[in-house]
Amino acid sequence: MRRALTVARELHDPGAGDLPAGAVLYDADGNEVAAAHHDRASTYDPTAHAEMTVLRAAGAKLRTWRMHGCILVTTLEPCTMCAGAISLARIPTLVIGSWDDSNGAICSMWDVVRDRRLNHFVEVIPEVLREECDALLHSYWHAPPLS
């Protein structure tokens, strides 16, 4: 989670108007495969969430869409789009920092990745370094307006 926080802090552009959220995908041996941050504002891409960008980069690097054995670490609870992609990518383990009470699809609003009607079940490890993740998001939501 510390690496995902670093990615969120270092790569996030406060002036771009997007959340400081970061995600990192590790392979089964613990090696970093890909890291990304929310980048919707600068790319004009509504799907450029940290998790989606990481999955795209990891798929290209690993040359597969199946992320068996990988662990995805994200500072913010994924939305329904990202939760669906996590399930489709067959990621077995998801580590979350902060909850997203308005858009979260892991526990807050829905529980997409552990829905027994789907063909893949994701183990969720919640609230890892939650206070640090919450503080980073709080700094975004309570930042002075851009002039």
Image: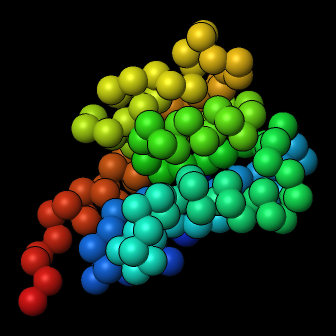
Q: Which residue is drawn at 90% across and 48% down?
A: 29
> Is residue 14 or residue 53 the one in the foreground?
53
| Tally of numbered tags | 0
Q: In this picture, is 144 found above or below 57?
A: below
Q: Position of residue 141 (x, y in %)?
A: 19, 61
Left or right: 146 in relation to 39: left
Residue 92 visible, this angle: yes
Q: Which residue is drawn at 67% across and 54% down?
A: 55
Can you tell which quarter of the image residue 58 is in? bottom right
Q: Position of residue 75 (x, y in %)?
A: 48, 51
Q: Quadrant of the C terminus?
A: bottom left
Q: Which residue lies furthest to the bottom in this view?
A: 147
Can you tell which quarter of the image residue 120 is in? top right
Left or right: 144 in relation to 61: left
> Is residue 65 or residue 28 the one in the foreground?
65
Residue 97 visible, this angle: no
Q: In this picture, is 128 found above or below 109?
A: below
Q: Residue furthest top?
A: 116
